[in-house]
Amino acid sequence: MRTGALTDAIAYCIESGHNMRAVALKGYEFTMKVLKSESGDPDIVHAPVQSEFPPDSRRQARPVPDFIVTGNCKRDMWKMITWEICEMNKLGKYDRAALGSVCGHRQSMLDVANSWHDYVCIIILNLKLSSFANNLGIFY
């Protein structure tokens, strides 16, 4: 996870039978609209999802959307729950650090840091994620 291979970590959790741990780690994904294309390669349109206008009448046929919604639509709730889990001391410190790395809980990551390099990486990661979220105008 420190090298940024979070998808590999999630795949490893699934292969080893830790599905709940994989789901908890996968909740970090922002919600995006992805265009449906004939070639099968999705083109990312924008994030976060904007609300669409409903038809003028209830009886009017709704158009078939040309996009797929990906990511975690309940990310705010996921972040609140994982943040509270990181605050509790019921999990081991390495499990809390893994969850803290995807939800932005700095103290849980600092608890397992061993060197000044670890401390600097944690601070920079946290600053990068929070500035990214602030640029999008969303809760991180």
Image (tube, helix red, strand yellow):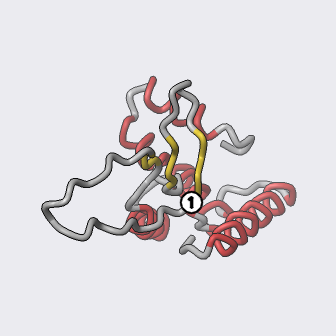
Residue shown at the point (29%, 67%) measured from the top left: 54
Q: Does 77 appear above or below 39?
A: below
Q: How many marks?
A: 1
Q: What quarter of the picture does the N terminus occupy?
A: top right
Image position, residue 9 (x, y; %): 57, 35
Mark 1: give few (<14), some (14-19) or many (20+) Cα within 10 Å: some
Does any portion of residue 55 appear in the rendered image? yes
Residue linked to disc 1: 47
Residue 124 in the image: x percent, y percent? 80, 63
User: Where residue 40 appears, x then y in whole percent?
Assistant: 53, 26
Mark 1 residue type: Ala
> Camera-side residue: 125 or 87?
125
Q: Is residue 89 visible?
A: no
Front-lying residue, 112 or 44: 44
Decide: is 140 above or below 35.
below
In the rendering, at what x and y percent does residue 114 appear?
77, 54
User: Which residue appears at 21% of the width and 54% of the height?
Assistant: 61
**Element type at marker 1?**
loop
Q: Nearer the viewer, residue 40 or 106?
A: 40
Position of 2 relative to 135 (above/below)? above
